[in-house]
Amino acid sequence: MKHLLLATCLLALVCPVFSQELYVSTEPASNMATHSLGIRLENQGYFNPSYKNRSTLEVMYGASKNLMLHGSLYVSDYYQGQQHFEGGSAYAKYRFLSVDSVQRHFRGAFFAKLSSINNPIVNQEITLEGDNSGLQSGVIFTQLLHKLALAGSVSYLHAWDNRGGYDVPSANAKNAIGYTLSSGYLLLPKAYTSYKQVNLNVYAEFLGKINPGYRQSYLDAAPAVQLIFNTELRVDFSYRLPLYNSMVRNTAHMYLIRLEYNIFNL
């Protein structure tokens, strides 16, 4: 019975056999299990020159095997002397391609994100995670090869004026191209015997953006470590290191700490 339950769990993709796809700074083309709920608490911050940080509450829902929905709320002191509520965003991802075989698969998904933010616009980077109101849409592809997962994405971002009378400055770009390349590797366990085993994943992610026509761009490396306990509780640690940068932004040299709890089979 124990082996039967484990096999069923693996086939349902509830156990973290593909946990190396749970990237820290990006999303994979795969979705969370159908009718499952994820709750994330996240903190990001930087020293430039004083310490600033942002906290995010995110709720995720697996609506079907092909559709996943997210909703996020943001609080930070990036643009104020104290923590204040900045606004929120909604995200949807639709998986349109699945090519599966034993311990490997190739998947593709479309995604879109909308945000409504109440902050002054002082950076050249367009980011919908608390800084800009706007729209982002793109495509993601993920390849799983046993313990190694690779993913890449490209997206278009459009910013509009923030709430509170904060307009996009005339010298700022309103359109941007984002791109990512991510790899994840499952270090532990060496072999699965129980869904209660702790998973240890390591990641190398590369995050870039370009403001066309403005000669503004950057590329960051974002190494990360991830622990998953009892398939339900996930802990992420990441830090961004600029490889090159010609853009005014908050995200350079930024740490990320995240706790995520998942409830399956609602």
Image (spheres, grey):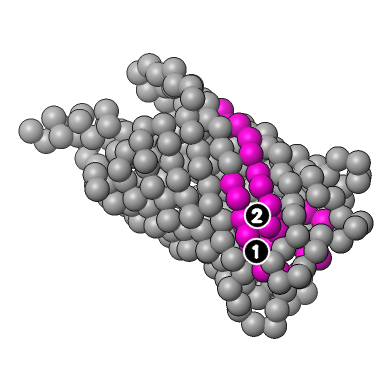
Query: Is residue 154 visible to us here?
Result: yes
Can you say which quadrant of the picture contains the N terminus? top left
Is residue 47 depicted above or below 140 in this figure? below
Q: Nearer the viewer, residue 70 or 244?
A: 70
Q: Going 47% across and 58% down the picture, which residue do you hit?
A: 58
In this view, the residue in front, 172 or 17, is: 172
Local SS, label 2: loop
Disc on res. 128 = 2
Classify mark 2: residues with Cα within 10 Å, few (<14), some (14-19) or many (20+). Answer: many
Label ID, residue 81: none
Q: Is residue 97 left or right of residue 127?
A: left
Please name the residue that numbered disc 1 is placed on.
Answer: 117
Q: Amino acid at mark 1?
A: Ile
**Residue 260 x, y percent position in the rendering:** 40, 56
| Marks 2 & 1, CB-CB < 8 Å contact | yes
Establish if 266 lies above or below 137.
below
Q: Can you tell which of label 2 and label 1 is closer to the viewer?
A: 1
Q: Locate residue 20 relative to residue 157 in the image: left or right.
A: left
Mark 2 / mark 1, whichever is N-terminal: 1
Q: Is residue 142 visible?
A: no
Q: Nearer the viewer, residue 85 or 209?
A: 85
Q: Position of residue 80 (x, y in %)?
A: 70, 79
- Magenta includes 259? no
Q: Which residues are magenta?
A: 113-141
Out of 231 and 37, give the one closest to the viewer: 37
Q: How many marks?
A: 2
Indicate the quadrant where residue 189 lies: top left
Residue 175 relative to residue 53: left or right: right
Name above or below for residue 90 compared with residue 81.
above
In the picture, measured across the screen, residue 67 lies left or right of residue 89, that is left
Q: Position of residue 10 (x, y in %)?
A: 27, 32
Disc 2 residue type (three-letter): Leu
